[in-house]
Image (cartoon, grey):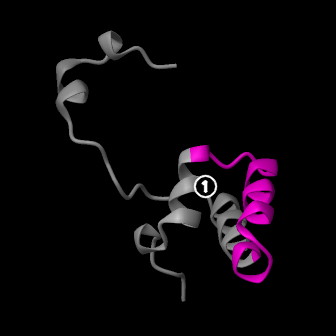
Protein backbone atom coordinates (compact mmCIF):
# COMPACT_ATOMS: atom_id res chain seq x y z
CA UNK A 1 0.00 0.00 0.00
CA UNK A 2 1.27 3.47 -0.81
CA UNK A 3 1.53 5.78 2.13
CA UNK A 4 0.35 9.30 1.27
CA UNK A 5 3.20 10.80 3.27
CA UNK A 6 5.70 9.01 1.02
CA UNK A 7 4.44 10.85 -2.07
CA UNK A 8 6.20 14.03 -3.08
CA UNK A 9 4.18 17.24 -3.25
CA UNK A 10 3.57 17.07 -7.01
CA UNK A 11 2.14 13.56 -6.77
CA UNK A 12 0.00 14.33 -3.72
CA UNK A 13 -1.61 17.38 -5.35
CA UNK A 14 -2.15 15.86 -8.80
CA UNK A 15 -5.80 15.21 -9.68
CA UNK A 16 -6.80 11.56 -10.00
CA UNK A 17 -6.61 10.10 -13.48
CA UNK A 18 -10.04 8.84 -14.48
CA UNK A 19 -9.15 7.08 -17.73
CA UNK A 20 -5.83 5.31 -17.50
CA UNK A 21 -4.40 3.44 -20.45
CA UNK A 22 -4.67 -0.31 -20.15
CA UNK A 23 -1.31 -1.71 -19.19
CA UNK A 24 -1.50 -4.78 -21.37
CA UNK A 25 -3.63 -6.33 -24.06
CA UNK A 26 -4.21 -9.52 -22.07
CA UNK A 27 -6.01 -7.59 -19.31
CA UNK A 28 -7.89 -5.66 -21.96
CA UNK A 29 -9.15 -8.89 -23.53
CA UNK A 30 -10.15 -10.29 -20.12
CA UNK A 31 -12.15 -7.15 -19.36
CA UNK A 32 -13.83 -7.30 -22.78
CA UNK A 33 -14.77 -10.94 -22.17
CA UNK A 34 -16.09 -10.02 -18.72
CA UNK A 35 -18.37 -7.41 -20.27
CA UNK A 36 -19.57 -10.05 -22.74
CA UNK A 37 -20.20 -12.51 -19.89
CA UNK A 38 -22.32 -9.87 -18.16
CA UNK A 39 -24.36 -9.27 -21.33
CA UNK A 40 -24.90 -12.97 -22.02
CA UNK A 41 -25.24 -14.42 -18.52
CA UNK A 42 -25.25 -12.19 -15.45
CA UNK A 43 -23.31 -9.62 -13.49
CA UNK A 44 -22.43 -12.24 -10.86
CA UNK A 45 -20.87 -14.49 -13.51
CA UNK A 46 -18.95 -11.51 -14.91
CA UNK A 47 -17.68 -10.50 -11.47
CA UNK A 48 -16.47 -14.02 -10.74
CA UNK A 49 -14.82 -14.27 -14.16
CA UNK A 50 -12.97 -10.97 -13.73
CA UNK A 51 -11.97 -11.76 -10.13
CA UNK A 52 -10.58 -15.13 -11.26
CA UNK A 53 -8.34 -13.25 -13.69
CA UNK A 54 -7.08 -10.85 -10.99
CA UNK A 55 -8.74 -7.75 -12.39
CA UNK A 56 -8.68 -4.90 -9.89
CA UNK A 57 -11.99 -4.55 -7.98
CA UNK A 58 -12.21 -0.85 -8.92
CA UNK A 59 -11.97 -1.78 -12.60
CA UNK A 60 -14.61 -4.50 -12.19
CA UNK A 61 -16.98 -2.02 -10.57
CA UNK A 62 -16.38 0.62 -13.23
CA UNK A 63 -16.81 -1.59 -16.28
CA UNK A 64 -19.80 -3.56 -15.01
CA UNK A 65 -21.75 -0.89 -13.13
CA UNK A 66 -20.85 2.22 -15.14
CA UNK A 67 -20.81 1.37 -18.85
CA UNK A 68 -20.70 5.07 -19.71
CA UNK A 69 -17.21 5.18 -18.19
CA UNK A 70 -15.85 2.35 -20.33
CA UNK A 71 -13.12 3.01 -22.84
CA UNK A 72 -13.99 3.02 -26.50
CA UNK A 73 -14.02 -0.40 -28.17
CA UNK A 74 -11.11 -1.41 -30.29
CA UNK A 75 -11.86 -1.53 -34.01
Determine the residue positioned at 18% across, 20% down: 9
Q: Residue at x 72, y 57 (%)?
A: 47
- Where does the image place residue 39, in percent across and percent down from the top left? 70, 81
Q: How many marks?
A: 1
* Along the line of sight, the residue nearer the viewer: 42 or 27: 42
Q: Position of residue 17 (x, y in %)?
A: 32, 49
Q: Which residues are magenta?
A: 37-57
Residue 62 spot, x, y in % from top left: 50, 58
Q: Nearer the viewer, residue 60 or 8?
A: 60
In the picture provided, is 60 more to the left or to the right than 45?
A: left
Is residue 69 found inside the magenta-colored segment of the image? no
Residue sitting at x 71%, y 73%:
38
- Determine whether 70 is above or below 19 in the image: below
Is residue 60 found left or right of 16 in the rendered image?
Answer: right
Say whether residue 48 is magenta: yes
Q: Which residue has dot 1 on it?
A: 60
What is the x, y in percent for residue 22? 52, 58
**Residue 3 can be seen, yes or no:** yes
Direction top: furthest residue: 5
Identify the residue shown where x is 80% and y is 64%: 45
Instruction: Work out whether 9 lies above or below 44.
Output: above
Q: Residues within 10 Å of mark 1 (few under 14, many from 20)?
A: many
Q: Secondary structure at mark 1?
A: helix
Predominant SS of the magenta segment = helix
Amino acid sequence: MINASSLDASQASAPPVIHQLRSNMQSSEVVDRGISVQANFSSICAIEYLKSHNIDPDVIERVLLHPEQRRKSRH
